[in-house]
Image: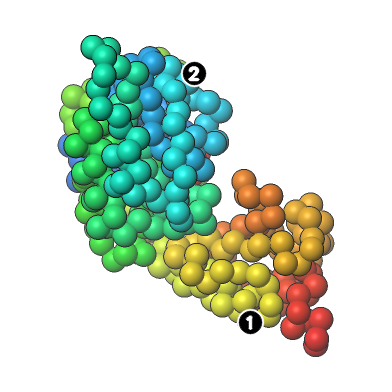
Amino acid sequence: MRAAIAAAEVGDEQRREDPTVTELQRRVAELLGQEEAVFLPTATMANQIALKLHSRPGDVLLAEETSHVVIYEYGGPAAHAGLMVQGLRGHAGRLTAEQVRAAVPARTKTADQAPAVLSLEDTHNSAGGRVWPLDELEAVVDAARDGGLRVHLDGARLVNAAVAQSVAPAEIAGRFDTVTICLSKGLGCPLGALLAGSAPLIDRAWREKHLFGGAMRQAGIVAAAGLYALDHHVERLAEDHARARRLATAWHEEGVPVDLDQVETNFVQVDLGPLGLTRDEALARLRDAGVGLSSTIHPTVLRAVTHLDLSDEDVERAVELVAPALGCRSSVRA
Ligand SMILES: Cc1ncc(COP(=O)(O)O)c(C=O)c1O
């Protein structure tokens, strides 16, 4: 990837003259089953631009209540688009068609304060990298469209979902009006994200990109990493998923509180509740043992993530170190 970055052909991205950015946008639009895509610095910006495209100030955003757009984007939907957020309680990060239908009231006034856009997340970060079954996704998207809503997919980790389900990313992403994809997560790039959608929407997104201060110059330096990742880092996500499963299964056997059903992609969530440890105590013990886990929005849940910088040996080391560090049952017995 570093070599691809060094060799990148570049131009002025703001003037749409950077050939590497243009090629990345073309490749990502095709990958996602959308007409066009625009290159952006972050997935947060991609989500925020999308929400602005689909709404007017005073409209309502429907989203699962722990989704990234609701809890991690600093109130961006309100700050940028003037949206009111209506968070819906999900299961494994997912909503049902009934929930969406119930959240779209019948029109009562000439100018309603009404939901304009539904945002879904796949894989779902706070739920532990959970994947939407395609039939559920379709039912929810259909319910939203029946209610006159636009639908956005926060697919920061969409490629993980596609690999986990053995489907083309377009099969998931092609159903949405707009889709965010992030390059700096499982795909392993230093930064970058894209927003994809119809040609008229992406045309408007370019204007928003300027308004957000995100239009760039020789951005091909970064886009080259994205092209490299599309060629080399997509199928290998299955290795991250297998390593997460190995970690989860082994930790579970060692008495580390892990719900194996939750492990669908590259996250393993560890519940500290049964261990009687606080988050800070557990993180400090793990750090001392040389293993990095991170906190989540759930006060007693930690997250381990497998990614392209982790080898099988690293995973085996984590298997050895984590149960004793947390004082789990079988390591205590040993
Ligand atoms: C689901 C989801 N969407 C969006 C983002 C934002 O990504 P970025 O850091 O590129 O803004 C994240 C980051 O963790 C995420 O998990």
Q: Quadrant of the C terminus?
A: bottom right
Which residue is nearer to you in this view: 13 or 151? 151
Tag 1 or tag 2, which sits nearer the N-term?
2
Q: Residue 100, how many percent across, how many down?
A: 32, 40
Q: Does residue 254 lie above or below 39 as drawn?
A: below
Disc 1: CA contacts within 10 A as few (<14), some (14-19) or many (>=20):
some
User: In what element is the residue under mark 2?
Assistant: helix
- Residue 165, picture quadrant: bottom left
Q: Which residue is mark 1?
A: 253
Q: Does residue 311 lie above or below 30 as drawn?
A: below
Give me the disc on residue 35.
Answer: none
- Residue projecting furthest to the front: 108
Q: Quick check: can you spot residue 164?
A: yes
Q: Residue 283, how many percent across, how many down?
A: 76, 56
Does label 2 point to a residue whose CB lies under 8 Å from ligand 1?
A: no
Q: Which residue is mark 2?
A: 79
**In the picture provided, is 224 more to the left or to the right than 299?**
left
Q: Who's the residue at 58% across and 73% down the image?
A: 247
- Residue projecting furthest to the bottom: 334
Identify residue type, mark 2.
Ala
Mark 2 touches mark 1? (CB < 8 Å): no
**In the picture provided, is 16 more to the left or to the right than 223?**
left
Q: Who's the residue at 49% across and 40% down the image?
A: 65
Q: Quick check: can you spot residue 196?
A: no
Disc 2: CA contacts within 10 A as few (<14), some (14-19) or many (>=20):
few
Q: Residue 7, how many percent across, how many down?
A: 39, 43
